[in-house]
Amino acid sequence: MVASQRAIDSTNNDPKTVVQEFDEINGSPKPFTTATGRGYWVDNNCGDCAARTLFFGRPGYVADIELGGDAGIPGIDRHVCEMTVLAKTFVWRQ
């Protein structure tokens, strides 16, 4: 995702670019730690929506939780924050 965003940024920053491409992600992935491990959350909204992906990893596995909604929904930013807190309670099955 980061490499894809670099390519998009390169295209969008070119003065010869006529049409801008949508961002893949907004900013760098942000690390977090929970009681059960570490992960990263990525702000990957599409410009007219609120979207976030949380990635969790352990040896040999990667899990992702995607959440979001249309920007027209009242309070969507608050809902995404609440869903992020809930998603961080993810626990691997034993």
Image (cartoon, helix red, strand yellow):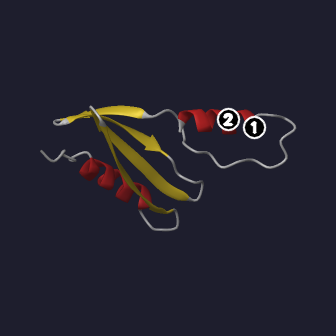
78 left or right of 87?
Answer: right
Q: Hey, what amino acid is under mark 1?
A: Thr
Task: Identify the residue at image location x=65%, y=49%.
Answer: 22
74 left or right of 22?
Answer: left
Task: Identify the residue at image location x=44%, y=67%.
Answer: 74
Residue 10 higher or lower than 80, as above or below: above
Binning the other alpha carbons within 10 Å of mark 1 as few (below 14), some (14 to 19) or many (20 upward) gives: some
Q: Quadrant location of residue 17?
A: top right
Residue 24 higher or lower than 58, as above or below: below
Q: Which mark is residue 70?
A: none
Looking at this view, name the residue that lies furthest to the right: 16
Label 1 belongs to which residue? 11
- Distance between mark 1 and mark 2 Cα atoms: 6 Å
Looking at this view, name the residue that lies furthest to the left: 94
**Most foreground residue, 44 or 50:** 44
Marks 1,2: beta carbons within 8 A? yes
Q: Hey, what amino acid is under mark 2?
A: Ala
Q: Quadrant of the C terminus?
A: top left
Residue 32 higher or lower than 88, as above or below: above
Looking at this view, name the residue that lies furthest to the bottom: 73
52 left or right of 3?
Answer: left
Task: Identify the residue at image location x=50%, y=32%.
Answer: 28
| Residue 47 percent location from the top left of the image | 60, 54
| Residue 31 percent location from the top left of the image | 36, 31
Secondary structure beneath dot 2 equals: helix
Task: Identify the residue at image location x=30%, y=54%.
Answer: 82
| Residue 45 percent location from the top left of the image | 53, 51
| Residue 37 percent location from the top left of the image | 22, 33
56 left or right of 71?
Answer: left
Binning the other alpha carbons within 10 Å of mark 2 as few (below 14), some (14 to 19) or many (20 upward) gives: some
Label 2 belongs to which residue? 7
Secondary structure beneath dot 1 equals: helix
